Image: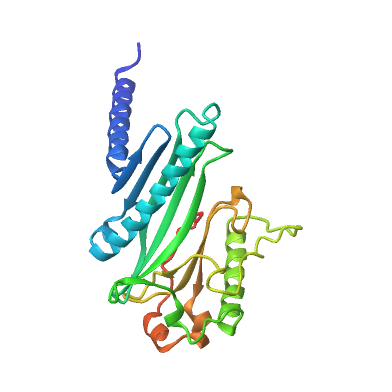
Amino acid sequence: MLPLAPIHNIVRIVVVGIFLTGACFAAEPKPDFAIKTDAVDIGIILDATIKANPALAADCLAEGKRYASTQRKEATDAKRSDPKYFPKDGYTFERHYLTASVVAGRYISVLREDYANTHGAHPNTYVNTILWDDVAKKRISIRPFFKETADDGPTLKAMKKAVIVALKAEKKRRGIVDAESPLDWYENIGASLLKIGPVTLAPSTESGKSAGLMFHYEPYAVGPYAEGRFDVVVPWQELKPYLSAEGTAIFGGTPPKRDDNDQR
């Protein structure tokens, strides 16, 4: 027979385990839009900040519904064309809209994170971004914050160079050896807004300001799948010569201190 004290400990562990498990289930966000059929399970989820902004929420949800409709059609077509090899549980897709920063009480950076499981070698994750102007009530780009943003112009060349430096530094921080190989993981980073990668306004230690530009790269974008995702900041000071008056007004401070265990 076990001594009394260990039994109490076991009971405590079980109770705590049940509590934590229940908390985890309770914390799971309920989709703001969902489709579930015998071929596909899709959820679209907006975070609390986005849901509190009616115009932004409507914009994200409309896009999310279009995405869900496309995935439903493709999954249905795949099951119909090859039912024997179509996975029994069907495909699973999740799209999350997450607030990355709010700058000057006007510019809201949104991360759009997609999860897709079609029962291949592994699930895939994808990341894109939205920059929302809450005065104009529409999506914008980072163009207004710079004097010029021509493809292969001085601003984008400087930005690309700074991004690659930041990526290499982040790989070194994680202990990744970025060995030379025939495959150049940075060749797809272009000196243009369409090719440099998804970008948000980085949070800052200075209230209402942005510390620079944060670039987001999904697995496979700038390294093997095993390296995971990369989110790197180019401080605004490195782009100071290229800032417009509007850019000068919103940038300031430094990025908040990160957790050394953060692998993103």
Look at 41% across and 60% down and name the residue there. 111
Q: In this view of the protein, which residue sits in the foreground, 130 or 176?
A: 130
Q: How is the image coloured?
A: rainbow
Residue 22 percent coordinates (x, y): 28, 35
Which residue occupies 65% across, 64% down? 186
Q: Is residue 53 at least partly visible in the picture? A: no
| Along the viewing direction, whichever of 7 and 119 lies nearer the viewer | 119
Which residue appears farthest toward the right when viewing the image?
A: 182
Q: Is residue 178 above or below residue 90?
A: below
Point out residue 114 in the picture as x, y percentages from the top left corner: 44, 51
Quadrant position of the N terminus in the picture? top left
Q: Nearer the viewer, residue 24 or 46?
A: 46
Left or right of 256: which side holds 78? right
Residue 191 in picture, x, y percent from top left: 60, 74
**Res 236 visible:** yes
Q: Position of residue 12 (x, y in %)?
A: 29, 28
Q: Residue at x 52, y 88 (%)?
A: 241
Left or right of 112? Residue 120 is: right
How many discs appear?
0
Residue 58, picture quadrant: bottom left
Report which quarter residue 144 is drawn in.
Answer: bottom left
Quadrant of the image occupied by residue 121: top right
